[in-house]
Amino acid sequence: MCSYNAPSMLLPPQELIALAGIAKQFKECNLTLIDAIAEPYGLDETVKHLSSAKPDIIVSIQGFECFEEDMHALVHIKKQIPSAKLILFGHYATLFPQEILEKTNVDMIILGEPDNIFYALLDALVNGGDLSQVEGIAYRTEAGIVVQKGDERITHPELLPMPAYELLKADKYFEPFLKPPFGLIQSARGCPYSCNYCVRSFGKRLTYRTPDQIIEEIIFLKEKFGIRSLRFIDDTFTVHTKRVVELCQKMIDQKLDIEWTCLSRISTLKPEMVPIMKQAGCKRIYFGVESGSQKVLNYLNKPTDLTEAIATIALCKKYGIESLAFFIIGAPVEEEEDFYASVNFAIDADFDYIAVSELIPYPGTELFDALRDQVDFTLFPYKNEWKDASMKERNKTREKKFYQHFYYRRKYVLKNARNILRHPWEYIENVRKLSLYLLSQRQGKRADYM
């Protein structure tokens, strides 16, 4: 998904290497990771590499807007390698297991947070166990499709094994203007907030891995890959001040000398966090701002204090931490004045970067339930768009305008002269990709960024 909507970065497939870490506990398992986006491989080449591995089991995750392409690829792979058990997990797989098993040749689906369920399923497959005793899976039997619900959350992620980072090729992954090689770590799962548009991969309850585990993984990534930068992929890295301070202090004490980025909310980044985060190597913070209109924020159940946001970004600038703000355009209540309130807020707050996307109500969210009669959603063929075609066109136009107003300012270009001088080819490439993206939006097509 990131290769389509964030063409300037590519993150490692954390979900897959986490399950590979589970599989490493079985001595019978020989592991191969194929990241066809990172390589990049087309479908035929992907099948070729899969076939050469002679797999007994294939595990894949599915995306959102690329759901149809994902399922087409998996159906083709299963046809070419029919002897392999094809296991799928992800948000749509969890929501719609019956429909996916009815309309594809996927063999099994893992429901919810996959790690412990995958362990139990793999144990049954490797050792000839009874699938009916494995909670949290869906599969076919002679009598029909069986869906066995189970506990969707893991209460102690600190007990999970380290993801199989060694399967990655670190030089394939990157974030803009960060030192390569680049890595990724998840230190916590879940998000306790109630934004009505958000797909919560792990639910609202927060679960944590220990700071010592995180330090161990960073040291491993440095020694194995020589990584010099990484992303903390937690939904909200800055939820608990004490934990952030403790982890940052350990990074400082270990003299890790690594750049890193993270995701935050305006309200959770406390003043006492910022200096120690900077000292520990924080290069950039991604903020889910979403809108500069209080009316739209209220609609999205996103209680951001815009005055507080200005002060928070100023604090980041004081300590030399870059800021990127995510904005959402296209809420049904968003009028022209609300849109320009967001544009003006982005400029006034002086974010270093912005990312803009259209509001899409996804199944499994409160917003989807509230707007179901306004959304045209089908799984096969995949479609998730506003029934009102004029809204779709308006949103495309606004997204393009937002980027143009923010990035194509003379003041912005001059402000970023240092980045241009330090990373001239990367800067030029990012401008090219942004222009391609805007062009594809105008033409209503998906650009080929890879």
Image: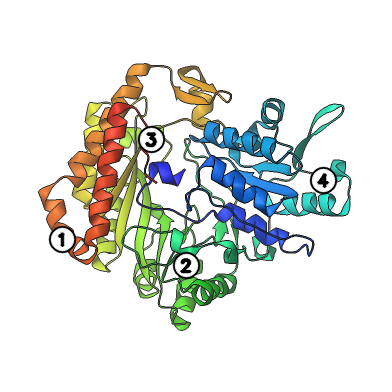
Judge whether residue 113 can be spotted in this image.
no
Going from the N terminus, do you reach mark 3 or mark 4 first? Answer: 4
Q: Give the residue type that dot 1 points to.
A: Ala
How crowded is the residue under tag 4: few (<14 C-alpha within 10 Å), some, or many (20+)? many
Q: Is residue 28 above or below residue 194?
A: below
Going from the N terminus, do you reach mark 2 or mark 3 first? Answer: 2
Corner quadrant of residue 391: top left
Indicate the secondary structure of the residue bearing disc 1. Answer: helix
- Residue 298: image tag: 3
| Residue located at (24% from left, 46% from top) | 346
Residue holding disc 1: 417
Residue 320 in the figure: left or right of residue 64: left
Residue holding disc 2: 244
Judge whether residue 167 can be spotted in this image.
yes
How crowded is the residue under tag 2: few (<14 C-alpha within 10 Å), some, or many (20+)? some
Residue 397 in the figure: left or right of residue 206: left
Q: Give the residue type that dot 3 points to.
A: Asn
